[in-house]
Image (spheres, grey):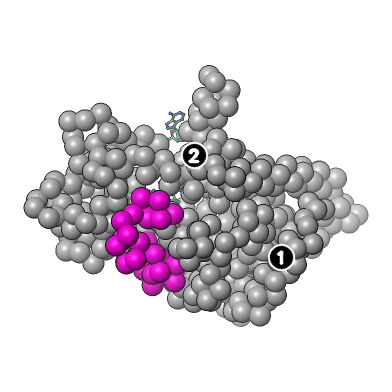
Amino acid sequence: MDLRFSEADQAFREEVRAFIAAELDPAVRRKLAEHRSLAKHEIVAWQRKLNTRRWATPSWPAEHGGPGWSAVQRYLFLDELHQAPAPEPLSFNVNMIGPVLIAFGTPEQQRRFLPRIANLDDWWAQGFSEPGAGSDLAALKTRAIRDGEHYVVTGQKMWQGMAQHADWMFTLVRTDASAKPQAGISMLLIDMRSPGVSVRPIVTLDGRHEVNEVFLDEVRVPADLRVGDENRGWDITKFLLGHERTGIARIGMTRRLIARAKALAADVPAGSGTLADDARFRERAAEIEIELQALQITQLRLLDAMRHGAHGPDARASILKVKGTELRQAASELLLQAAGTRAWRCADEFDEAAHADTTIAATYFTLRAASIYGGSNEVQKNILAKTMLGL
Ligand SMILES: Cc1cc2nc3c(=O)[nH]c(=O)nc-3n(C[C@H](O)[C@H](O)[C@H](O)COP(=O)(O)OP(=O)(O)OC[C@H]3O[C@@H](n4cnc5c(N)ncnc54)[C@H](O)[C@@H]3O)c2cc1C
């Protein structure tokens, strides 16, 4: 069952679906359906196709190259990408640094970076967290000392997603060590080819290399690459995190996990039928699907509020983050349960099915991190307790 959309919205959904069917490389679709990682060139090629229609930047205003979509259209577009499945435009680019530069950047920064952000000519990384500063981001220690027309930046960043591909990193640095923690932070744009920048991989529990440590050793950054005023980086951070979280529910992705679990379960003998007929399996799948439906309505409400001028951070973005990730994790558990011992099969290049199965356990492990990144779920619950319950 779906929510009822207007005829115009349905026509829009069909247009997106037809574009994906015509333009998406089937090999990329298949990799995503099997929860495999994509190569950089595959992500870039797809974003450039979207950008020929201004579709790579769904939330940007038309004057900066966005498509001028309504909140519902943005929702439908993402839902179609997730269900296809097709890659989302790179979030670091289009949901994070793009909106930040539109809201806080100088006209020169906007001219220089926005078109390249949209077309993925530059790949951006998010340089916020540090070994001692994650949930408590304001504790960050990476320091930037002004030296004429430059800042000299020294410190260590941690957990930078896909930074191995990055050309640039939007980075939080401490520019005033004597001020209160939140008051002494600025945002700098750092060219990853600058002398003194090094990226070291972190291989996670799922065996994948998606996150990294980034070391900054006396990196010279031109002062005109500071975003906003000096020591006002915290306001920008709050704005950015609100944007980051709205895209985080990923309902279509959870639906695909459930669909894959059901398809596998139909193959697993249980009692006189298959696991797909098992009452407890069906009940668990239905529970997740019902909660997803409720989450979808919450997401539409938030998008509608944004359309009417509300800007993040909105507490409902925290609900999307918490519930969206809990449901994706629950769906990955269902998939693991349906796969049973198949989840532990080794890759065999001659056996396509076995090859696809190897991603099931990895996907389960990958999704453990979903309740941590983008602000941990515990911290989101603190935000909800404060803003919605007044505790
Ligand atoms: C896969 C992955 C990708 C990431 N990508 C990026 C990226 O691209 N760029 C970037 O800058 N960062 C990134 N991060 C970092 C991420 O934002 C942090 O890991 C996250 O904010 C948590 O910080 P931490 O790891 O320091 O844990 P901590 O903050 O030390 O938290 C440890 C535990 O304590 C809990 N906790 C902490 N404070 C409270 C509190 N006040 N109340 C209740 N519980 C609390 C947390 O919920 C968590 O369970 C990524 C992380 C992961 C795992």
Where residue 214 sits, quadrant-wise, is bottom left
> Which amino acid, mark 1?
Arg
Q: Residues within 10 Å of mark 2 (few under 14, many from 20)?
A: some
In the rendered structure, find residue 313 and report the number of the disc placed on it. 2
Q: Which residues are magenta?
A: 99-124
Q: CA distance from mark 2 to mark 1?
A: 28 Å
According to the picture, the residue beneath numbered tag 1 turns out to be: 13
Q: Is residue 206 above or below residue 165?
A: above
**Number of dots carrying numbers:** 2
Which residue sits furthest top?
391
Q: Is residue 357 above or below residue 383?
A: below
Q: Is residue 84 above or below residue 246?
A: below
Of the four image quadrants, the one with ligand 1 is top left
Report the side of 224 relative to 206 (left or right).
left
Q: Main secondary structure of the magenta part?
A: helix
Q: Tag 2, which secondary structure?
A: loop
Which residue sits furthest left?
148
Where residue 178 sits, quadrant-wise, is top left
> Which amino acid, mark 2?
Pro
340 or 111, nearer to the observer: 111
132 or 352, nearer to the observer: 132
* Picture coordinates of residue 354, whole percent (x, y): 64, 70
Q: Is residue 101 magenta?
A: yes
Q: Residue at horizontal 14%, vertical 55%?
A: 150
* Picture coordinates of residue 99, whole percent (x, y): 44, 54
* Picture coordinates of residue 139, whole percent (x, y): 29, 35
323 or 280, nearer to the observer: 323
Query: Is residue 161 in view?
Result: no
Q: Residue at horizontal 53%, vertical 19%?
A: 391
* Picture coordinates of residue 203, whole percent (x, y): 40, 57
Report the side of 205 relative to 81 (left or right).
left
